[in-house]
Amino acid sequence: MSTSTIHDLIARLKKLSFEDMYNNDFLLTWQKSKDELNAVLTVAEILRHMRSANISPRVFDSGLAVSLFRDNSTRTRFSYASAANLLGLAVQDLDEGKSQIAHGETVRETAVMISFLSEIIGIRDDMYLGAGHEYMVEVGEALTDAHNEGLLERRPSIVNLQCDRDHPTQSMADLQHLINEFGGVKKLKGKKIAMTWAYSPSYGKPLSVPQGIIGLFTRFGMDVHLAYPEGYGLIPEIEEEAAKSAAKSGGSFTKGNSMDEAFKDADIVYPKSWAPFAVMQQRTELLSNRDTKGLGELEKECLEENKKHLDWECTEDKMKLTKGGDARYMHCLPADISGVSCTQGEVAASVFERKRAATYREAGYKPYIIAAMMMLGKVQKPHKLLERMLKQEGPRCHGKG
Amino acid sequence: MSTSTIHDLIARLKKLSFEDMYNNDFLLTWQKSKDELNAVLTVAEILRHMRSANISPRVFDSGLAVSLFRDNSTRTRFSYASAANLLGLAVQDLDEGKSQIAHGETVRETAVMISFLSEIIGIRDDMYLGAGHEYMVEVGEALTDAHNEGLLERRPSIVNLQCDRDHPTQSMADLQHLINEFGGVKKLKGKKIAMTWAYSPSYGKPLSVPQGIIGLFTRFGMDVHLAYPEGYGLIPEIEEEAAKSAAKSGGSFTKGNSMDEAFKDADIVYPKSWAPFAVMQQRTELLSNRDTKGLGELEKECLEENKKHLDWECTEDKMKLTKGGDARYMHCLPADISGVSCTQGEVAASVFERKRAATYREAGYKPYIIAAMMMLGKVQKPHKLLERMLKQEGPRCHGKG
Amino acid sequence: MSTSTIHDLIARLKKLSFEDMYNNDFLLTWQKSKDELNAVLTVAEILRHMRSANISPRVFDSGLAVSLFRDNSTRTRFSYASAANLLGLAVQDLDEGKSQIAHGETVRETAVMISFLSEIIGIRDDMYLGAGHEYMVEVGEALTDAHNEGLLERRPSIVNLQCDRDHPTQSMADLQHLINEFGGVKKLKGKKIAMTWAYSPSYGKPLSVPQGIIGLFTRFGMDVHLAYPEGYGLIPEIEEEAAKSAAKSGGSFTKGNSMDEAFKDADIVYPKSWAPFAVMQQRTELLSNRDTKGLGELEKECLEENKKHLDWECTEDKMKLTKGGDARYMHCLPADISGVSCTQGEVAASVFERKRAATYREAGYKPYIIAAMMMLGKVQKPHKLLERMLKQEGPRCHGKG
């Protein structure tokens, strides 16, 4: 990979307006301007090319990147750790065994105590509908207050590693993948993506991925078709947000209850299981009340309901409905693959096997997207820094050549 | 922050005598000379100012800082990780699930096995009265032996992150806070601090904080007034140590059983719950025997006893007794705040809210205190190194400017 | 330690042929050529001397070293973390709570997801006979495929941190120890080592250490005498491998059922408990079936069987049988020491106490062996890099002098 590509990308970055990202958080893509989203995508590509060229993009000689996961995650955890490490930050996990859902003084205090020498706080909190995003906002306010009161010399920036509303590091990585697959962000205009529910023998999967996709892809003039069985709706406000964005960007946002219709002539399909919004609300209440019995009954009920929609599977026949009979397939992984990871699931084995490499490639963008969000949150003039790095050509691995 | 302040601090450091700290441990403040304590305070301030000036105080290109926590801790864990990272060390946790209380060969072996490429071993062991400090001493002896036998090229230094006797990283951070609040260590002379017990709906809180405070603050000519309900005494030897230090430093050490008397005209109040010494002894025995039933009974008994002292709360009325009606308030956090984190606790919500920012600021000194202990344990001539760093001005964050 | 020693070692390294190690894995010593083994030993010594000379051997400005432990381990975990840190890599643990024994798509996917910005994957998987090594091979194949498909820019190298067959970081550290004790690898020729079973009040200890020892030491012309009570055999293929290697190297491989015969005139003794091969096979099956009752019965049975061999203890009397009445004693630690860590175990307290320092020294080589495996896996021309580092003399600790 030549450094001229990197210079072109830096030139592109210079033209974008993203001043507000400095010392700020990245919580929801729909709170960010198009320029800000493009800045993330551009910096991510620069970092990726720099690594290929063995140029170290180390921003920090020291500093912590706090990781606060309220849910298990291998993929995002590794992506976060990779991103932090690439920029020179050490990951410090916050043991949340004790903390659970916290509010008020507890949140404020913890937020400050973990931040004295920290640059970034990555938070994953997707278990409780109506709680994850609110928690991140509360932490952010505590950080701003503490910074204003002179208690924190620097205000760490929060990176949303998945909340109840959005999963921006996932959706942005997905977007980057498509941009590179189609040869540029402008090529996405008019492309049809089918974001559809799919059957899975599990229940309670978060809504943040489909919400993230419809919330982001409608910004780029795509034809976003959201399909799910009746009753499996997403948070209504986010569906509305998507509709508005589509209108503004010259794309479209369509909702329906047929997988076939969604797949018809689609350039891209993204079949993925999730729990209905209403169920997630019930679940949140039961979890809050620690109603184990209620939770068990809800799970049983939902699994029964799910089974009525076994035909929502991304089979070879369904794929034939798509553009050219073989659309691009996306998934945030791991997928429930029929006959492989479960008896029957989201996708047929033959389809997944054919698309496997592409889904891995898709996932590979996430570390760079996170690193870009970190850099834009903590470096005021990233193009200057990147140019300096490029000039110095400090190697990431000294053992080459 | 200007670098001239840093030069002044380095000049001050040069005049102090602290040769014995090199390759040594920091276990108890009362084992350290005044010069040694001042060296820690001075280096901590230098590091804090260097970070503000964006100068990296990285001592190590590689090396481990082992963290061995036998009790949960978010605050100290983050402070330790921040300090290690600031100096260039990677934190490696020792999984103590298996180890429990160990003696003899096991301690000796583990101590060496974790030390081959380690610079610092941070230990928190405050659960068992009479065990924590002894354990650290035993680890230290094993390290010295192994170093003398040529098995360890370098002898890691131990930093006490809280034992049954002292909590030096806390008390030293508290001291640093007061020095900066009052405008110099000499200003502390004659200032009255009320270190008092306070009611909490929990039981079994360690004695190390009040012990650490009376053991350290009496060294600096302060009037230390220790107050607790009858029966809530600290380790007698440490109370005696404090009395001796006060006599030597020209301060005073008073004990009493009245919160009001302690608060009267106090410049600083430090109301905090702890378990009586005698109870901690009983508890240690029961824990050693894994006597769950006995532990449950002891807890019940103690909580009943605690409830007789609900009036030991830092209320607005109590604060009115202090110097100027509003003394400085200290706490190691988290505080039990009445009506916030519990129904009734150590401090009234209105008092805490007014003092909140100050307690956060107090906590913010801990990472630098720990880093200073690390540096003094591992760098023979820190003033030379610091001067070199100051000259080179290697940035901590390359993204500034 | 002078740098001339290091230059000599680099000169030796230059003469060795180890091209195939680059971007490859280190799984079993018997898959490696003599030159490759010597390259590991030589680089390990270089790194050890460089650290003594305070020269930083940092290869990476950033990058992850994944640690995937399917069994507890303090010693190897710290050695791995030390090695990674020495070369500039950050350790990222893979939480294996969820993963258990995985195959096919799951392995392939996880392998790629943890590898996007990773340089090394250290795996410990010694619980299931017939599974550990196979798992590592499967991960390696997934990495190669992903690299070939362009999904991974770099292919991380796997380091076997103990599998069901071999424990190469242990056996290579043991070998390095002996080389330094005897004054050169050539001095090992003709030396007799007694690798013997020893009694322990536990059961189910892995076979990888004795297998690793007989598989490696027979390569260097040593007289390897393996002894165990009837029924306590190792994996037959590996015993055969050892016999073949001995024939080739001009050493010998003897099997027997008498500890006395093994100890007779031995230069080195390595008495260590393990479970019989047949028992490990049964155990693997029971574990796979989660047959708790069966496992309990097997354990009881085995402990009874073990008790028939209480005399397999490395006592003072047994030591008298060895060369000069006091052979070198080796152990991978922790040893079951009679009267210290158990009532009766592998070794008498007086023997262990006399040999304690040596066993600690033995363990001290492991971090460097692992770092050497990492470096040879990721640096194509290590002698060039090492020469450059030596010239630059970048300090590991800036605080010296």
Image (spheres, coloured by chain):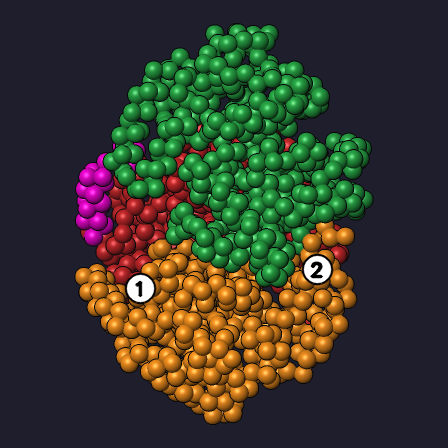
Chain colours: A orange, B red, C green
Crowd rating for badge 2 (residues with CA inside 10 Å; few <14, some 14–19, many 20+): some
Q: Secondary structure at mark 1?
A: loop
Q: Amino acid at mark 2?
A: Asn
Q: Residue at x 48, y 60 (%)?
A: A75
| Quadrant of the rendering where the N terminus of chain B is positioned | bottom right
In the visual, does B264 lie left or right of A12?
left
Q: Which residues are magenta?
A: B287-307
Residue C336 placed where, x, y %? 42, 23
Residue B380 placed where, x, y %? 67, 40
Residue C213 in sight here: no
Q: Which residue is mark 2?
A: A54
Q: Secondary structure at mark 2?
A: loop
Residue A105, picture quadrant = bottom left
Residue C190 placed where, x, y %? 65, 15
Q: Which residue is mark 1?
A: A201
Residue A375 in sight here: yes
Q: For this rendering, which residue is in front, C322 or B226?
A: C322
Q: For this rendering, which residue is in front, A322 or C146?
A: A322
Q: CA distance from mark 1 to mark 2?
A: 44 Å
Looking at marks 1 and 2 on the same chain, the residue that comes earlier in the sequence is marked by: 2
Q: What's the chain of the residue with tag 1?
A: A
Q: Amino acid at mark 1?
A: Pro
In the visual, does C130 lie left or right of A385?
left
Crowd rating for badge 1 (residues with CA inside 10 Å; few <14, some 14–19, many 20+): some
